[in-house]
Image: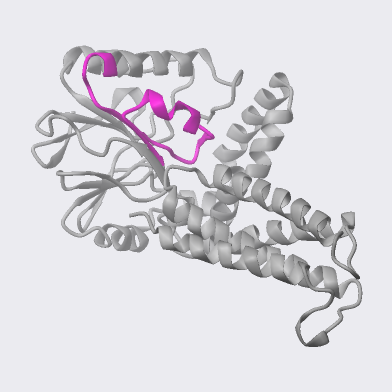
Amino acid sequence: MHKRWLWILPLAVAAAIVWLSSQSHYPGGLQLPPPLDKVAHAAMFGILAWALDLATRHNRPDLPMYRRHLLVFGLLAAFGATDEWHQSFVPGRACELGDWVADVLGGGLGLLASSLHLLFTRHLAALSWWRGATRRSDASRDLILVADPHWAAELTGLEAATTRFPEADWLFLGDVFDVWVGMPGMESAAQRAFLDWVRGRRTAGRWVGLWLGNREYFLDRHADGFDLLGEGIGGALEGEALTWEHGDLVNTADRQYRLWNLVSRSGLLWLLFRLMPGSTARRVSTWMEQKLRTTNSAYKLAFPRQAFRAAAEARPGTTFLTGHFHTHEVEANGIALPWAHEGRFMVWRGGKVETL
């Protein structure tokens, strides 16, 4: 639900900044010596960044966090430059590059501060987003569930299942490939073949959804190619008692992964990938895939049963699905789907999850 009233917050903060910049001194005749004056201005821009991020998140749930942060940062930089120019007309004030740098740094720190809670909580709306249709045209159709196939060069099992169940819809619950970075020039032949397959299924009138996992990065540019594309928590189908997420965010105790998740999906990393030559970016993505296989093993080996049960019970009245754990587990109303290697897919059929 959109909360347009939240735009009042950044507008009020921006108005306060403009008013303060129009004064020759702070209220009460207060004069802040350098660098305290820059610290005060940076703090105001940090508050503005937080307010802008909050309002944007609640009114544009289709924006991934990295795009939202880049948008907010760009707006702050432009507003800061305009504000500094405006100050040059105020007696006793000057337009200084250092002030603009302080403003921009304050905005960046504000965005960082607004994200820190994501390291410790299940309240993850700030990093969750989705685009597309959350209702299937025919809910009676089989919905084939594919969790963690980790394809490399071959789309194992996909064509066989398509031939056997041509009328079915499809939901992919993440980690479709060993690693998939959605930058131009970085996608493999197998990934392009998968996108062609999705196009074919949709042309045939079938619903195809993809919920991103921990091995997919910056795929939002493909959103128009799927009926539903999303990330984080909160996956659901209207009119069907089915909810899901990939599963990588279930375990709140896994701080190391939470930190990596924020860094690897940040606007800064996106910018770095965009600036890299294609060959360098591909080498970096390969290195990332290799590191993902071997790091943080303490949390990968044990199924977080208590955390999984809590996540499932937070979605009462539904069947709650995840992939990620590569093991078939059932807790309360939650089902962790098995690893879909060698075409081992599941199906949502008649309100139940079954082996395909």
Residue at 86% across / 79% down in the picture? 32
Q: Residue at x 67, y 64 (%)?
A: 46
Quadrant of the rendered image containing residue 295? top right
> In the rendering, at what x and y percent does residue 132 appear?
33, 35
Q: Vertically, is 261 above or below 102?
A: above
- The count of marks equals 0
Observer-nearest of 33 and 15? 15
Residue situated furthest bottom in the rendering: 28
Q: In which quadrant will I find the N terminus? A: bottom left
**On screen, 187 above or below 76?**
above
The image quadrant of residue 131 is top left
Q: Is residue 281 above or below residue 322?
A: above
Q: Is residue 123 above or below residue 347?
A: below
Q: Is residue 116 visible?
A: no
Q: Is residue 174 visible?
A: yes
Nearer-the-camera pick, 130 or 308? 130
Residue drawn 15% across the image and 44% down it: 240
Which region shows up in magenta? 202-230
